[in-house]
Image (cartoon, rainbow, N blue to C red):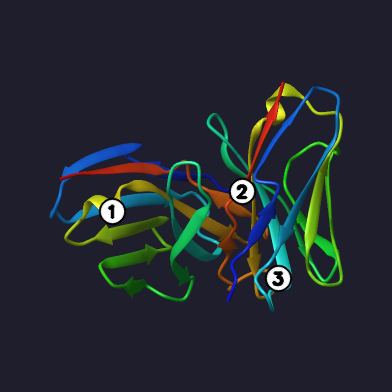
Amino acid sequence: KAGVTQTPRYLIKTRGQQVTLSCSPISGHRSVSWYQQTPGQGLQFLFEYFSETQRNKGNFPGRFSGRQFSNSRSEMNVSTLELGDSALYLCASSLSFGSPYEQYFGPGTRLTVT
Amino acid sequence: KQEVTQIPAALSVPEGENLVLNCSFTDSAIYNLQWFRQDPGKGLTSLLLIQSSQREQTSGRLNASLDKSSGRSTLYIAASQPGDSATYLCAVYSSASKIIFGSGTRLSIRP
């Protein structure tokens, strides 16, 4: 069974631009969560989608948004990029929403904002 | 507000030793706790998931325990190997339906 895939793996953008990251969950998984990982703040939860609906949201500004498609694939978008948005963005999939479902992570997208 | 702490931040031990990694959380109203490992520049690999009703889980050389009342979990690694070198993270799924990660313990196993 294929794991969680994320595209692209690496991305370089300039301040003010916007970016879209993609995540394909494990086949049969219907929940997708997004995380931001930085050396200073560690791993922080962005949002979780299930059945094309956002179920949970972390404490991030509205520049961070996401969506989920009917095939459970998900995209996240960051508008008006700032230098501080440079991070490893990880997505994770699970069978369903919430506890007690185990999360499986993708390899991440490394975003660098210059 | 749930806070998750992992101590120590870094640990170096010789190969073959048994070791314990610690994870503590402030709000005992959790649904589950999950341990992950992360290799440099890579995503997270799930190691063990403990439901709130469970006391421990085992997988191979790994054993994780959970004590909700004291807000603590430990990950025990038996007979450590150089391939165990990685950062180990614990994550708590709390009653606020959000997942909070600890900052991790960077483990180095010396051959």
Mark drawn on residue B1: none
- In this view, the residue in front, B86 or B18, is B86
Circles 2 and 1 on the same chain: no
Residue type (three-letter) at the residue carrying disc 1: Gly
Q: Who comes first in sequence, dot 2 or dot 3? A: 3
Residue type (three-letter) at the residue carrying disc 2: Gly
Q: Chain of mark 2?
A: A
Circle 3 sits on which residue?
A: A97
Circle 1 sits on which residue?
A: B83
Q: Position of residue A91 (x, y in %)?
A: 66, 55
Report whether A23 appears left or right of B33: right
Q: Position of residue A93 (x, y in %)?
A: 65, 65
Report whether B61 appears left or right of A84: left
- In this view, the residue in front, A95 or B24, is A95
Between marks 2 and 1, how big is the CA–CA gap? 21 Å
Comparing labels 1 and 3, the label whose residue is closer to the camera:
1
Look at the image and tell me in which quarter the C terminus of chain B lies: top left
Circle 2 sits on which residue?
A: A108
Q: Position of residue A17 (x, y in %)?
A: 85, 28
How many other residues sit within 10 Å of disc 1, few (<14), some (14-19) or many (≥20)?
few
Between marks 2 and 3, how big is the CA–CA gap? 21 Å
Q: Quadrant of residue A26?
A: bottom right
- In this view, the residue in front, B21 or A17, is A17
Report whether B79 appears left or right of B106: left
How many other residues sit within 10 Å of disc 2, few (<14), some (14-19) or many (≥20)?
many
- In this view, the residue in front, B46 or B31, is B46
